[in-house]
Amino acid sequence: MELILVNLIDGLVTGLLLFMLSAGLTLIFSMMGVLNFAHASFYMLGAYFAYQISLALGFWAGLLFAPLIVGVLGAGIERYGLRRVHQYGHVPELIFTFGLALLIEELVQFIWGKNQMPYSVPEVLDFTAFSIAGNSIPAFKIFMIFISISIFIGLLFVLTKTRVGMIIQAALSYPRTVEALGHNVPLIFMGVFGVGTALAGVAGVIAGPVLGTFPGMAFVLGSIVFVTIVIGGLGSLWGALVASLLIGWITTFAKSYNIAMSDILNGLGFATPENMSENPLRDLWTVTSPQIADILPYILMVLILIFRPAGLFGKRET
Amino acid sequence: MKNLSKLGVVSALSLIIGASAAFAENIKIAFIDPLSGPFASTGTNGLHQFEFSADYMVNAKGGVLDGQKFEVIGFDNKISPKESLIQLQVAIDQGVRFIVQGNSSGVANALTEAINKHNKRNPESRVLFLNYAAVDPALTNDKCNFWHFRFDANADIKMDALTDVMAQKEDLKKVYIIGQDYSFGKAVAASAVANLTEKRPDIEIVGNELHPIGKVKDFTPYARKIVASGADAVITGNWGADMLGLGKSIIDNGFDGPIYTYYAAGSGITGAFGESGKGVIRLIGEGQINPPPSDEAAAFYTAFKEKYPDGNVDQSRISNTIGMLAAAIEKAGTADDMVAVATALEGMEYDTIWGGKLFMRPNDHQLIQDMHIQAHTNEGVTFTYDNSDYGVVVESTVKMASMDIASTCEMKRP
Amino acid sequence: MTDQITTDPGKPAQRMRAGSLTLTVAPWIIAAIALMIMPLIFQSNSALTIMNQMWITVIFALAYNMLLGQGGMLSFGHAVYMGLGGFFCMHIMNYVEDFGLALPLPLLPLFGGVFGMGFAMIIGSFSTSGAGTRFAMISLGVGELIAACSVIIVAFFGGEEGISGDRTYGLPFFGIEFLKQIEVYYLISFWLILSALLMYLFSRTPVGRMANAVRDNPERAQFLGYSARWVRFYSFCASGFFCGIAGGLFAISYEILTEENLNAASSGVILLVTFLGGVGFFFGPIIGAIVFTLLQTVLSLQTELWAIYVGALFLATVMFFPGGLAGLIMMHVPAYRLGKARGLVVPYIKTLVPAAIGILGICALIEMVFHYRHGATGDVEMTLFWTTFDSHTVLPWVIAGAIALVGIGIARATAPSLKEAWDEANTAGGAS
Amino acid sequence: MSVPALELNGLKKSFGKAEIIRGIDLSIGKAERHAIIGPNGAGKSTLFNLITARFPPTSGTVKLHGEDLAGLEPYQINRKGLSRSFQITNIFPAMSVFENVRCALLWAQGYKYSFWNLVNNSRSLTEGADAILDQINLLERRNLPAGTLSYAEQRALEIGITIAGGADVIMLDEPTAGMSHSETDYITELIMKVTEGKTLLMVEHDMGVVFGLADRISVLVYGEIIATNTPELVRADPKVQEAYLGAALEEEH
């Protein structure tokens, strides 16, 4: 029972972290139609910048400045790179972000080398907040939850209560109309891209010390962010939140409990084959949930796309 | 378009061919390992150790035979079996006769099969495969061949040695086994179970599971299970980011027993574990670093750090590979006849600067050597890793580990 | 070989058709001869291996472009179809070896093709109902699933070590045992010409034509009696077939298939390859495959930083030449038709040569920075462009910097006159 | 009386709460030229889209030659001999003019999804497409990308694509929208020529075109047909004058 609670907290942390990435991406994706493959790269840049800043000015300065730098960089890339490519259509845009992801990873290796960076939790937060049945919950995790939720509330406030937010919301559903109404859509695009990448940067800053700061960190995150926003429904902030938490909990619970495929198959009335080592389906029988935890989101996405193409909360068909 | 592409091919291929013309008198060793991409740090550091060993141990002493020098050439295989095979072919065309590789048993498996076929089909340009780190037991068992030599202890030997030491710890009651979901991870788990049930039937294996390799972002759920299982010790074969992620997560979530593992030193991992890994991380491996086993070893280490301040001597087997190869070439009296060199390597006994003896077992080409359990710590460390205050210190040693372990290898000699 | 050539404006239909025949046949004969001659020029085994790799990538890229260029479908998991075809062929190869069946090796890729197509039929049955994001994301999901399965389902995929076989155990084919690389080379070349020809002809069939129509305007195609979904489905299956053939050839060439053949990185690479070559033209992917293979295999021998250059090249291509390298070449067709292409030669030399030198200068600076930062202590010598120097002294930096500045400077200064010459060359009339 | 070419019974369509089409009954005979007029927002395009299954109707039926079209996809309806054009030009811009027309001929000539025929080798396809191009006066432009044609030429091409398949029921959605006088005359003449002997249903704003072309006219106002009759009688109908012309006048102010 206690373990369920612990897993709920862990899944929440994973989910909220994913949300910070998918929130920005869902805005960018649904507004500009850009499948930004480099989104996770900005997450990585956030971690590296924060590490570099923390060496000189400490963790808190990193938390403040690294996302800003990432956001400005993102806006600059939109302005001088993506906007130019925009006229050619979506596929070139995609290739652009693809190449960008490749280049950022190489540049990070060029500048910081290929090793893992010793970027660690600040001492103020390096203690156990509380324990549940022997499982310690580090204070930093509570801090991550706090940061993510603040950002979500802030984002929700901006989107629903401010004029800029209204325009962005309208642009999410009707990009053409908003342009026709005389708003400076390129400026909005640049802003959204900047904010989206800055959010990814924040995620990098707070995830770097826990999940490791290394050149492969963007690749590890990979396409799961796309999966999240497709499951949640394009352009839906709530969808992104729900899908992130769903993925966070599904993967956490799948890893925490060894659900064996043989049990499921037995439950369905199939008898375990006698001679397992000769059976061509032997690998299927021996699969356990931790093995497949990280591909469950992909299965979920394919099912959603087949049966509910608009996603959980989406209004538009993907 | 045809002309353009042809021009490109001509210029590109002439580069390869041009490169093969130079340095004809050197004995060339092709280092085929990742030099770019996520595993590049291990690969680059390995290449430096090879280059340094060749210069320091062979070239500085006048080379082998009539003064022939070793030349180590790096080939970037991007840890891809396909690229490795292409680079192998390029290397052979450049006149390379010795291939060294270590990262990923998958690549090693592809290479050993390709080399076996190549040597069968092209007797005039045979090559030897000196495997310095791929530890899948199959390579010296079912899949062994005459051209393959392994200078690292395989996963079974390491586990045998590791469980010998664990078996003596009376207070050890519960062990948790976790690893990456692929051949090596599975081999480690199977070997651990087999050895523990044999040596200490009273130890309860409270968990035995696999996780996807290189895909796990957050190890917390695994760590929770380990803590909840009440395990006294953890055994894992994880390496790279998976090792660091798992280790950190286990420690962060309140585990304080030993984590027995294979690869948790150097390449930034020692530095990243830092204080938190002290008293927890235990490694099984060859080659004693601390305390320095001999003056030569200390001198070697110092010289290496002078040349590569950012590097680590974390694979002493690399210098063993170079040293034994040089000895074999001297003994065979040739660097061109691979059958002669291979025969010279078979059964060779070699005194390593890292302490103890090395013995290349002839029936399966597996090197037999001393195994050490080393602890991650900052006390008594003469040579640290990653320019941190931390390094590894030998706690216990198994002499000539698994000298008489059986092998299923049926060596076919030419 | 392209729509643009065969639909030359202003010619009556009948003459057009006669003309297009020679226009379409000639490149194929030239290509076949070139394939025959190449091994005589490059005889080393490594050159043959690299060319084999190139031709396999060409088939794969052409098959990929059946979707992306001709059908407007963006797939993120296309390595799966090639990989599965390859795995299947490898199993057949081992089966033939174990049971001594009579299957000539050259026919093996056909089985890969059938298997690739079979799998494409299963996935296509639900993924081709949409073209845009939905198709792309399903392909991504399926790709990830299969790649993950390849590590879990060891019985078929052989885990992380993959499965391997020996191509020489099959029955000799007219006395050829495929022991030598050169024999494999000709086998692959044969399949290359055959598959490329079939893929080209496919684009000329009713389904192929309608694939273009559906790409441009799926709704209008619906009102012409064609179901967009079925048109996409047929293209998808055909693409799967040729991917499977590429997979079969891979199995023959490397004699090993691993997880790498299925994973997301391979799927991404083929997208980049195809786009680099140019999706708008049939021959685009051919150029892309050749250039990329050379970059990946040969440039990586020269510098550790190859991936940086490749990344930069992609960004430059997508920003400045969205038509890819093929688009760049075809840009010159109008000027050539007008007989003014020659007028471009001198301005090109004036701008592009300094630009190239300038870029090399920048590359030199990058290499020097890298060497300075990551080189071994005391190892101050580095060799660049056949020159060996000390990277810890000022002079080389000044020289490289100066080369970069001057090269780029001249290129910028001459760019306007190139633009002028370009406009002039593409304007009809005037002195020619 | 023989079976009508196109018959609508109680056709209704709502988007959310807004009822756009409020029950339409209409019967169009074979070889009749029928026009639908009405003020903006009357639901003319929606009606077209209902007939061609671009949207499903909320209730009611559409019958083509007496056959119910319910549940059929647009491409299936097309195969039964109903072809339509679009209000906003809807061609294949990246393909050549000739290719545009040839694609429209493929299904009608029985090529279906074949991948064993080469389109270039088919004389009947080439000649058929050239004949259509000749009819719509675009033979000169045959090999240009369709996207580079002038607006009027694109509209002509649209009509060409629509008639190419040999459908006997042709539906044109505002074929002369946004054209100059001379262009309008050209298109009107073209429509006359290509719909000879076929059933035509068209939506049109230009009264000159409507009264010149149509055998009968229906007036659609707020989703209902308020009158169907010959051009002369419709013109004289006071209800039409009040409802439609009044609305049209209002709009102009």
Image: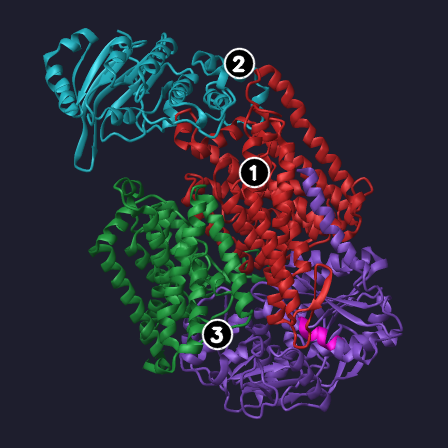
Chain colours: A green, B purple, C red, D cyan
Q: Tell which tag, 3 or 2, sits nearer the viewer.
A: 2
Q: How many other residues sit within 10 Å of disc 3, few (<14), some (14-19) or many (≥20)?
A: many
> In x, y percent, where is residue B92?
78, 59
Pointers 3 and 2 within a single chain:
no
Q: Amino acid at mark 2?
A: Glu
Pointers 1 and 3 within a single chain:
no
Residue B33 visible (yes or no)? yes
Residue shown at 34% from the left, 43% from the top: A317
> In x, y percent, where is residue C343?
63, 33
Front residue (pair A207, D189): D189
Looking at the rendering, in which quadrant would you find the N terminus of chain B? top right
Residue shown at 25% from the left, 49% from the top: A167
- For label 3, the SS is helix
Q: Which residues are magenta?
A: B47-54
- Residue C327's label in the rendered image is 1
Residue shown at 56% from the left, 29% from the top: C3
Asked if residue B90 lies in the magenta stretch, the reply is no
Pointers 2 and 1 within a single chain:
no
Q: Residue A39 vs residue B296: left or right?
A: left
